[in-house]
Image (spheres, rainbow, N blue to C red):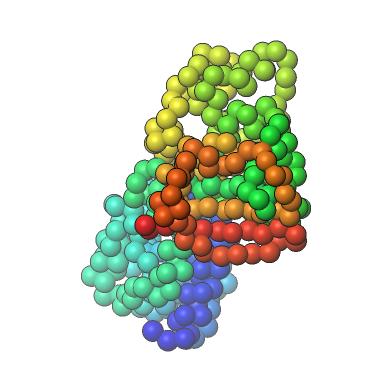
Amino acid sequence: MSTEDERFMRLALELARKGEGWVNPNPMVGAVIVKNGKIIGLGWHQRFGEKHAEVNAIEDAKRKGHDVRGATMYVTLEPCSHWGKQPPCADRIIEEGFKRVVVAMEDPNPPVAGRGIEKMRKAGIEVEVGLLEEEARKLNKIFIKYITTGTPFVSIKLALTLDGFIATENGSSQWITGEKARLKVQELRRRHMAVMVGSGTVLADNPRLNCRLDNCPEKVKVILDRSGRVAEAIKAGRRFRLFEDGRVIFFTERPELFEGIAEAYPITEPEKILRKLGELGIDSVLIEGGRIACEFLAFADKFYLFYGPKLFGNGIKPFECLKVETASDAPVLEIESLERLGESFLVTAYPGGG
Ligand code: AOF
Ligand code: ZN
């Protein structure tokens, strides 16, 4: 494959990203149609349940008066071969008479998984697979995890002081990081379908837990409230801003307290909570409550650790439940990147292999 091919695939990856936040639990997908070295159509998957990237690109080309017969399509995910909410893209590509299709990665979705590629090859289309595959996999980390396990991709986000506290002893934490870091959190919310905190955070900070960027869909707000403290506070007349938009789900030992207030499930074990969220169609959850982070540590797929330029000396530590005694026994994270955001730093990391 040539550098030209790579250029078109990069553009397809860029287009795919425009669907971020809007397509979950579907993948972000982009497609570029090229004929005689010229781009004639662009498309991406824009909204969950709506047209796929390939069809949008074909329609874009036709709208501009182009004939796609004999053209090449660059697509970031294998065109589907199954009937879901949309008809199979592989069939459409065959019908339209494409000559060549360049695919970044196979669709990990079991009903597709190679069948789209096979179908197109059988129909005589030249199909190449694997161009910028690593980038495509990175783009759709959430989708890959969810479609292959049925449980959501779990990200843990924390705002820490330089000496590692998430709040002072009495729970004060506003603010540890600056504005730029908090804007970045909004971007993280856009990427994840759900935001999760514990009842302590709700009672202490009264957060909105929404995404306030332009072009950002409503979030599912998940609250762990073992003893139903939020429900009791509501009954005592308190109002919480998290109810202002989006779906709100509680996990509690006392679901009866939430009748007439919100959706509630009698589940409190982290593993079962994640399984339930998966069943509810939620592909990704951003854990923002520092106190619950430790409970979900074993299930984390990614860490976003924001460090603000403050020292607390003492206070609440995020991973106290770990109780590491020997340094050599500590979990080791695999650092992905370090980014300066004003006076704060963001460390992104994955759980380590060892
Ligand atoms: C593609 N192009 O742009 C996307 C694909 O219910 P449906 O019909 O929307 O199908 C969703 C599944 O199709 C999804 O799980 C994934 O396997 C694939 N998504 N495929 O050819 C696209 N978004
Ligand atoms: Zn499709």
Q: Quadrant of the C terminus?
A: bottom left
Q: In this orientation, does residue 191 appear?
A: yes
Q: Nearer the viewer, residue 19 or 64?
A: 19
Determine the residue positioned at 57% across, 19% down. 228
Determine the residue positioned at 34% across, 50% down. 148
Determine the residue positioned at 40% across, 51% down. 329
Q: Quadrant of the N terminus?
A: bottom left
The answer to whether 251 appears left or right of 230 in the picture is left
The answer to whether 82 is drawn above or below residue 75 in the figure is above
Q: Nearer the viewer, residue 202 or 67?
A: 202
From the top left corner, tell me how far across and down residue 242 is, in percent: 67, 32
The answer to whether 304 is drawn above or below residue 240 in the figure is below
Which of the 4 image quarters holds residue 237? top right
Total marks shown come to 0
Which of the 4 image quarters holds residue 54? bottom left
Q: In this orientation, does residue 183 appear?
A: no
Determine the residue positioned at 26% across, 75% down. 124
Residue extending furthest front?
326
The answer to whether 244 appears left or right of 52 in the picture is right
From the top left corner, tell me how far across and down residue 236 is, in percent: 70, 13
From the top left corner, tell me how far across and down residue 98 is, in percent: 37, 74
Q: Nearer the viewer, residue 228 or 72?
A: 228
The answer to whether 36 is drawn above or below residue 164 in the figure is below
From the top left corner, tell me how far across and down residue 257 is, in percent: 55, 14
